[in-house]
Amino acid sequence: MRTLLVLNLAGLRYGVWEDEVRSVREVDTVHRLPLVPACIAGMAIIDDRTVTLADLSVCIGLPPTPHAGKARLLVMSEDEKVAGFLVSGDIEKINVSDEYVFRMPRYLSTLAVDTCVEHHGAIPVINVSALFSRVMKADREPPAPEFGVSQQAEADISSISHLRVFECAGERFASSGGGLAPEPAAAPEIARLSLMPAYVSGVGLYEKTAVPLISLAKRMGLPKSGPERAVIIADIGDERFGFLVDADMGMLSNRDFLLRALPPIAACGWMTTAAVANGHILPIIGLGRLIGARIEEKPLPERYSPDSDFQQRFGRQDVDVVEFLLLGSRHALPKSEIIDVYPLRPYRSVPNAQPIVAGVAEHDAELLPVLDLAAVFGRRSFVVPGWSMLLVKNGDFKAFVLTEGYFGVRRLLQEAHRAVPMVLPHSVVYGCYPDGYSVRLILNVHALGVHFDRTLVKGFLGALSQEMEQAPSELLPELLPEDYAPERDAAGEGYAPSAVAGHVPQAAVEEHAVTSPGRLEMSETEEDVSKKARIEAEQAVLEEERRRQEMEEKARIEALERARLEQERARQEAAERERIEAERARAESEAERMRAELEKKAREEERLRLEQERLQKEEEEKARLEEDRAKEADSLHAGEGAKGQKVGPEDRTAVETAKIIKEAEEIIRTERLLKEEPPAGIARAHQSSPDRATGTCRRMDEAEPRPSLLKSFAYIALVAAVIGSIFYIIFKGSSIEKKTETAVEAGGQKSRGMGGAEPKEEPLVLIVPKDAETVEEVYIVKKGDTLWHISKRFTGNPFNYPRVARDNRIANPDLIFPHQKIRIIKER
């Protein structure tokens, strides 16, 4: 059993083994020396000998020992210039058995502090002998931990069978259940240490083992939301760690969650996957990677492959853009990069992401980043229900963009394209275009996301419009340059960036206190009490100011929201009026078009009626002409010769032809009678007749076939009659035409013995195409032709087909045959 001297160093408990110290002496006066290292407390006279005293608090990385109060000297040597270490306050002695002595975890162990003792919590023990040797060697820098972790290969995410769910900084996270203690544990007593980063709370004892205690919220860069009452014990490598969380939610089976990869822009080396359980997104934290050495990752721009051609088309051809509202002002995105517009859907924030990444949301079985483009202006949007999300895709880069309002697609003519009047890297802005008295930016979401940094924000601040400065949003002071003047309220007074951003000023004080934990537990002197009271008064004033500004900001946001809703209502009413006017104009235009069509249809029907009347008159005229010709032929055949009138050769031909036709008809009728059964008497008389030459009888059916001769003769006579009729018609027609022409020339008299005038009609002039086949100025009918199409083709009017038929002696205009020749008068 050994005796431990328990010291109070800068408000923290440390121990020193009594057997490593020669003696403990009280020091009445310590003379401070100028221009000496901080680890030298000063000089004192001990046993009539002037010696140098080292400050134990500074030698282990804590603030210097205060001037006021009792001072004691831990004597380490009586013959060295540096006699020992100066400490202050009372010294407590406790007896410790070996079973209550533990080695300091390697993650926190240093040359000066390598063990700890359990006594109402853990007490770090200073290896005062080793520390004194360093001081004597003029190595006055306090030894710091290496924070080394023996890394293990991360478990395959797909093989995770269960997850440990916990709450940290008001958000839920998860970690692989492998290597974690199965039961939740309460946070142990924490022994704070010097030279620790903010996320290392200290050391604690768990099952007779000293474990480092890591604040997960601080390690992930999240704001601390409350006391960390639970600890998750994890075995990482060959060492045990404790991770402080707000609450331990227990285990989650793989039947209750689905794994989704985080997008590269929202992922990091210790967080690449998330679990989706009951509609909630739980980022999975790799605890070993979180506290281990920095992991080399491929730069974010190299993890995406964009393929948009908008940059090449802008300025060279008309383009389409989608306008949306950002910080109260219109901006635009290329329509080719917009997949769709969605109502605001749930999303959650992720740690260690750029300020432009508001969080991630699930869409079509994958997690997509949700971007707040207000961050490029040094702000964060106040998202409220009623906002929308634009789904953007550029190659393999996909993301949601938050927007207050969506205005649809706009066509930009080439002459409206402009280059941006500021120098911005990585083509984060494609260009701009004028819109009335304003200029609209066309943003490149991919470039803004993967190349986001403070320099980019500084370049965009010059593009802030008055509407954007007055838009309800949260300033991000960490992104703004030091010389940037924040927005002003209606009274012209500048907002304090931290207050506008909603940050509690005390957070900075707490962060500083955590960085130097010893200052929180120092003995309170009058100066400390005064300083504490002053800080509390300042905090109260700042808190009151913050509440006042929050109320003013809330009222301002409500007023802006009401104004926005009023503007939206007015815009909708104006759009509705415009739509109604457009519908009315379109209806009137449609009615006018229908009236024009009806008038055109009526004119066409009238023209068709007139054309039909003309065709009917032509048909009647044709029938009358044929009737006149038939009557004239009958009169020539029946009576002109009997009256002693002179008969011309054409008339005689007609008479002869009529006779031939009549004889042929008689022969055909006789043949038909012979084919029928003869009467009985005639049949018997002709059954046998003697052959006068031979004296024998021949049967009637053995005689020569007289009926066949009669049939042949009849056919010959019929053909002759037809040929004669044709010649008669030709000669007679020629005679009639000559008489008609003579009558017209004489004064329009009738050419035949019928009443009424018959005006001369000029033959149609057919326009023959160059590629039409013509033989001796005739058109040869082809298969599929009709007089309708021939008339339309050569005269331009299909209703001229009766005249074409009449000029070419076609009896039936609806019946023509291939290879038939139609006379053509070529146009000169």
Image: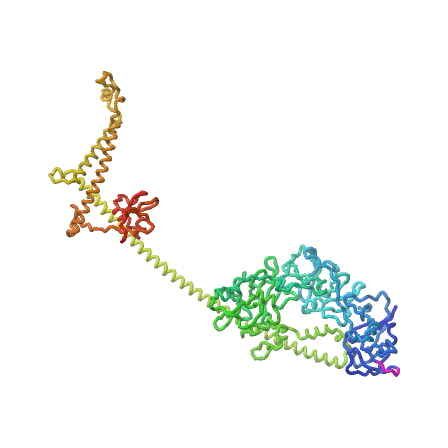
Q: Give the left or right position of residue 127, taking residue 350 as reference.
A: right
Q: What colour scheme was applied to this rendering of the protein?
A: rainbow
Q: State the image quarter where residue 201 is shown.
A: bottom right
Residue 815 seen: no
Point 83% across, 83% down: residue: 29
Q: State the image quarter where residue 168 is shown.
A: bottom right
Please state the extent of the stretch shown in magenta in the rendering. 47-51
Vertical relation: 334 (above or below) 611: below
Residue 549, given in percent of the width and then of the height, sits at 61, 76
Residue 685, given in percent of the width and then of the height, sits at 22, 20
Toward the viewer: 303 or 13? Answer: 303
Quick check: is 773 in the magenta stretch? no
Q: Give the left or right position of residue 765, taking residue 119 as reference.
A: left
Residue 760, given in percent of the width and then of the height, sits at 20, 51
Residue 546 seen: yes
Point 74% across, 68% down: residue: 200
Give the residue at the far top of this rendering.
695
Quick check: is 48 in the magenta stretch? yes
Q: Give the left or right position of residue 741, taking residue 311 as reference.
A: left
Q: State the image quarter where residue 668 is shown.
A: top left
Vertical relation: 471 (above or below) 797: below
Vertical relation: 11 (above or below) 756: below
